[in-house]
Every structure is written in C-alpha cells, then in structure tokens.
Image (cartoon, coloured by chain):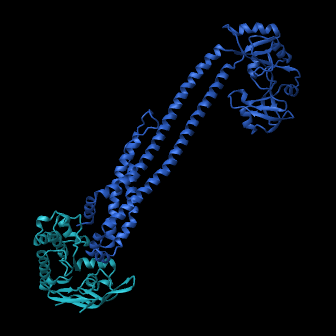
Amino acid sequence: MKLHRLVLREILHRRLSFALGVASASVAVACLVAALAVLQKHDARTEQIVAAKEVETQQQMAKLEDDYRKLMLKMGFNVLILPKDQNLSDLYADDFASKYMPEEYATRLARSRVVTINHILPSLQQKVKWPEHERTVLLMGVRGEVYLQSAQQKPLLEPVAPGTMILGHELARNLGLDAGSKTKLLGREFTIAKVNTERGNKDDITVWINLAEAQELLGKPGLINGILALDCTCDALDRLGRIRPEIARILPDTQVIEYASQALTRAEARQRAATEAQASIQREKENRGKLRGEREALASVLVPVVMAGSAIWIGLLALANVRDRRGEIGILRALGLRSRQILLIFLGKAILIGLGGAGLGYIAGRAIGVLWREAPGAAPLHIAFVDPRLLLLVLVAAPLLAALASWLPAISAAQQDPAVVLREE
Amino acid sequence: MSALLRIERLCKSYAGPTGTVSAVNEVSLTISAGEFVAVQGPSGCGKTTLLLAAGALLQPTGGRVVVNGQDPYVLSPGARAQFRAVNVGFVFQQFHLVPYLDVLDNILAPTLALDTNGGARNRAFALAERFGLKHRLRHVPAALSTGERQRVALARALLNQSKLLLADEPTGNLDEHNGQLVLRCLAEFAQSGGAVLLVTHEPRAGEHASRIVQMQGGRLR
C-alpha cells in the first residue's frame, strides 16, 4: 500500500472535515480571483469609456465646428480700417500698414455711435528689429478698447499696461522669456505680463505693448496705422458694402477691408474645444484611476484578511485532524513509518485541500467577476473565463498556503512519541 | 536455538509529579526462536513498558535490548523505525486498526513503511484466509466483531514475516473462543521458528506459552 491511498481513504472517511477545508480555501481563492477579475473588468471598462469619450469628442468637435461656422455667418464680422492711401498689396506683403492716421479717428468713430460696430481697437503695428535679442518682430501698440457707450461695456481686449509687454508664444519660447521676467526693447525696459498660447500665425512672433509707448519708440506720436472694428452686425448679405459708406461718412480718408479673423476665431474655438475635450478625457482617466486605486486598496485589505482567516481555519482543521488520529499515528509509527512519512500524510491532505479549494475558488471567483457589473444597468463587459496564468497561480499558491497552514499540526503529528500514545490508548 | 530477543538489565524510569518513577528495574530476559514467553503480573507492574522497550519503541534509561542481533537504540530514529518494520510485529489489546481502511488495507498497512512489498498482497490474502477473514476483506473495522478485529491485527503483525512478535494483552477484550484462537495462533507462530513475548494477566496464557515469568514492581521474579 502506498501513502497516497491512505490519504485518499482518510479523506473519504472524514468527508466533512475535508469539505470544510476545501470550502475555506475556496473562499480565499474566490476572493482573490474575483478581486482580480473586477480590477481586470475595471481596466477594460476604463478603456471602453475613454475610447467612447474620444469618439464622442470627435463628433462634438465636428458639430462644434459646424456650429461656429453657422454662428459666424449669422453673427457679426470684423473689419480693419486703414488710411485711404494704404496700398493693400504692401499690407498683405508686410503684415502691417505703412501709412498712418491720427489716433483720434478711433475716438471719433466711437463717438459717432455707429450701430453696426460693437468694438473698436486702434493699433500701431510695425515690423522692427529687436536689437537686444537680434531678431525681427512684429511690434504692436494697443490701448485696449475705445468704448462705444460706457466704461461698463464688457471689453473684448484688455489694454496693455505701460511698462509691460505681452509676447507671442514662439517668440517667448525662442528667447527663453517667461511671464514676470524683464527685458529691454529698443532701450526701454519692460516686464513681461503674459505669454500667449500658441496660435499658429503671426501673433506667435508679435510683441504687444502700450500704444503710447509704441508711438514713442517708433517716433509716431499720436498716430496709428489701423483700427479693428470687431463684431460688426449687419443684416444685409453684402455686409461690407453696407458698412463701408457708413464709416466713410465719419472717416472720409480711410478705407475698410474685412479682417480675416473668422477662420482664426473658429480655429481658436476649435483649439479650445479640443483642449477642453482632452482635459475631459484626462479627468475621466484620473477619476477611473482613483476608483481603481480605491478598489485595489479594498482588495489589498480584504484578500489578505480572508486568506489569513482561511489559513487559520485550515490550520485548526489540521490540528483537530491530528488529535483525532493520535492512536492511528501511534500504530503507524509502531509499524515502522518514519516521521517524514507521517508529515507527508498530513501535508498531502493539506495539498489536496488547497487543490480542491483552488479549483472551486477559481470557478466561483471568475463567475463572480464575469457576472459583476460596475453599476446596475451598465453594459455587460466580457472577460475570458479561463485565464491560464491566473489558474496556474492559484493551483500552485493555494496548495502551498494550505500546506503552510497545516505545517505546525503536521510537525506535531510527526513528532508524536508512539510509545506514549500506545500506552495511553 | 539463537536468541531473537535479549534484554539485559533493562531499566526504564519516568519523571513523575512526586519524583522519578521506576517502571522497569534491572530486568533481563532472553527469548530464543521457537519460544513463547508470557509475562504475567498485576496492572502497573511494568509489563507494557517492558514490551515497548523490547519493541524498539521506548528508549530505556539503562540496560540494553538486542533484537535479532541488533541493538535498535543505537540506530537513528528513521533507521530504528525501518528496523521495527522488518523485525518486530505488534498486537495490542485495543487492536489499533486504522478506522478508515478496510480489512485488506489494514493487513497491508505495514507495507507503508517498506520500500518494497514483494508479495505482500498475496501474503495478505493468505493471512485473511487463515484467520477466517476472506469474506470481510472490504469491510472497515467498525463493521467487524471484536474477535475479527483482533484477528485482523494479528494478520497485520504477521504480514512482514518478522521473527519477533510482541503482544500486549491481546485477549483482554475477547471472549473465550476468540481468546483461545489468538493464543493458539501465537503458539503456532513460535512453533514455526518465531519468538513471542506476551504480556498479560490472562491465566489461560499458560496453556500455550512455553515459559511464564512473573513481574512485580518493575522486576521479574
């Protein structure tokens, strides 16, 4: 007869004790497998949510762009008022007007209460050499908005305070300048109030300063070379045809062209929407990550506690088994079995308990994981029932843990003195 | 006749609550092949201690035990267990059968200790037949009568064909018929060249034993 036959016979004889051991191991294994399955499902769900969010964002972006296009058509448009003698070819070639007009024109236009114009922005713009940094930039002097009605009007553009400048993105990056740092322009010191975000146009190499300071630096006191009239509202289809005579009536020695800012505005809006969408996806990822962390934390407490409880229970069952079989151990030792063989009898049983628990626990835990849904009514998410690596892990770990839990009782059985047992029995 | 069991000035004492208790004191006994020696005496006189020490189960505190020419107590615990499996058979009053093994497996239990069990299964069947257990081979001990249980224990003790049989009150729980059957079997074993040490206070033992020694207070008289 071999030891394994003895072990199997004993298991069949004490079925309840064995079943309780297997049940305990199953609970521990099921807990571990279910926790891992839930986390696996969580990850799959996260991927699903993020992918759906990305698709949704793309759809929203397309819709947003369409909406902007329609809005821009229905709402106002922007015009640029230039000196009458400004050659438009030069303007498009140089990116700034080479002719000048009095700054007072902006005030006059504002006071005229032109109903089709909502915002007036005078500016002095010129391409200059920035000697301190040895590069050419577009210098723009602005004074903010010339109010049409009152100072309570919501400004479209904040003025640039004297002594400060705003830098385009590319310029700041190339020169290594940040908001708050100081720099010199044409011999005058300025504090950088702000660095604009990337716009992908000439704004990225533009320096904005206060209009009065620009006039001083460029030697153009009281002069400007453009007035941006923004958010012009006009019901007529030929909006430019309607607004031109109105402005010509007030500022006769000027000309009016449409300022190509609709596309820019649309692009900026699209960029903002895209940024917001990315931020939203990132927030979703962070929230999911946080939820995963909480679930992981719960599992990292629950699983060891259940495993420890299971190990203690298996250890107690083994101890009771050793006590029940005291006489049997005595006679087996008398018949010549060595301590090592007695140890193997008890550890063999523990290993079978672990194997049984691993099998049943895996099935139960995986079933829980497969059936589990994040929220009532959530879309079902499929995970494979058989995960070979996990199955192998529990088939190795559970018998090992059960054997460890039974180790001390098995040792005590192996060390029993047969003479003492036989004399007492 | 060669001595299969030689006990020389054997002493065994235990630490008790009131000091050291001497269970066996300066006992010497030799049993040769073919001898059936019965040790009789009142309860607590040291009979079982003598038997366990003779069976390489209980390390003496003094003296020497030689079984089949070998002192088992100079061996390592593992080697001593193996020595026991090969050289000594035991029969106890309480039978000590393994409760979840059937009759055949209980008879075969000594083979658990051996690396090889050449022909053990055939010997087990033969022993079962000899002791009238053939129709009970698949029954567990709980389904057997006390006489049958002792016969299973006897068959188990004989399976490994050891030369020395140690029996501790084997008839204590048996009726007249079964008691006689067991004693007769022990006598037959001795007659076939084995040696039997029986400890008992059973008066009938004298009818079968070749020698009876009395024990009292840990000493042989």
- Above or below for A344 versus B80: above
Find residue B103 and report its image quarter: bottom left
Left or right: residue B200 versus residue A346 is left
Q: Quadrant of the N terminus of chain A?
A: bottom left
Task: Please name whichever residue, A382 or A251, is drawn nearer the observer in this view of the structure.
Answer: A382
Task: Give the cyan chain's letter.
Answer: B
Find residue A126 and report its image quarter: top right
Q: Quadrant of the C terminus of chain A?
A: bottom left
Whole-percent x and y of residue A219? 88, 25
Whole-percent x and y of residue A321? 33, 64
- Above or below for A235 versus B122: above
Residue A344 visible, this angle:
no
Left or right: residue A218 versus residue A52 is right
Q: Residue at x 68, y 7 (%)?
A: A236
Whole-percent x and y of residue A186? 85, 33
Left or right: residue A37 versus residue A272 is left
Find residue B73 and report its image quarter: bottom left
Q: Residue at x 76, y 37 (%)?
A: A179
Task: Please name whichever residue, A58 or A81, is drawn nearer the observer in this view of the structure.
Answer: A58
Q: How many marks?
A: 0
- Above or below for A181 versus B180: above
Q: Residue at x 28, y 89 (%)?
A: B217
Whole-percent x and y of residue B145? 15, 68
Chain A: its colour in the image is: blue
Residue B1 visible, this angle:
yes
Q: Residue at x 13, y 74 (%)?
A: B178
Task: Please name whichever residue, A375 or A424, is drawn nearer the observer in this view of the structure.
Answer: A424
